[in-house]
Image (cartoon, grey):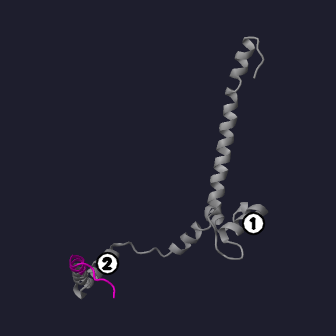
Amino acid sequence: PAPKPPSSLRSAMGRMADALAKMRTPEVMAAKAEMMESILSLAPAPKPNAGKLTAQVFQEPFFKNLKGEGMIFKIPFWSDYHTKYFIGGKKGVGTGRPIVHACLLIGCVGYTLEYLSHLQYLGHGRKHAHADGEAAH
């Protein structure tokens, strides 16, 4: 048989069970339901044309791109990329690889910019070497 927990733990568990039982009495549950109904009654009623407005919002270019219907997806590379990584191809399950691809792209672009901006400082050694009449290293 499994060892019994210490008596202090058993009494704490019993107190927790009693507190939960007090919270779930029919009277308390009815009071909570009334409170939720009063909160919901304060909410504004939905407008009759809310469905049309929602449909118009989902026609925005941002949502079209999320669904894979935007202009960029007419380019074969992007449509294949979207199908392979976001939709998941034949499996139907997307992956997290686009996040890794975005991080690598940002890293490569940042490294390239840092490298190109650092090249302007590499000529200092050459300038001093020629000033003394020595060959540059």
Q: Nearer the viewer, residue 73 or 6?
A: 6
Q: Which residues are magenta?
A: 1-13
Q: Which mark is residue 8?
A: none
User: Could you say which quadrant of the image residue 89 lies in?
Assistant: bottom right
* Cβ atoms under marks 2 and 1 closer than 8 Å: no
User: Could you say which quadrant of the image residue 121 lies in?
Assistant: top right
Q: Which mark is residue 80?
A: 1
Which residue is labeled 2 in the image? 36
Q: Is residue 24 left or right of residue 125?
A: left
Does residue 125 sit above or below 11 in this rendering?
A: above
In the image, what residue occupies the spot 33% across and 76% down? 41
Q: Is residue 9 visible?
A: yes
In the image, what residue occupies the spot 64% across and 74% down? 93
Q: Is residue 75 visible?
A: no
Does residue 105 sit above or below 69 in this rendering?
A: above
In the image, what residue occupies the spot 54% across and 69% down? 53
Q: Nearer the viewer, residue 137 or 71?
A: 137
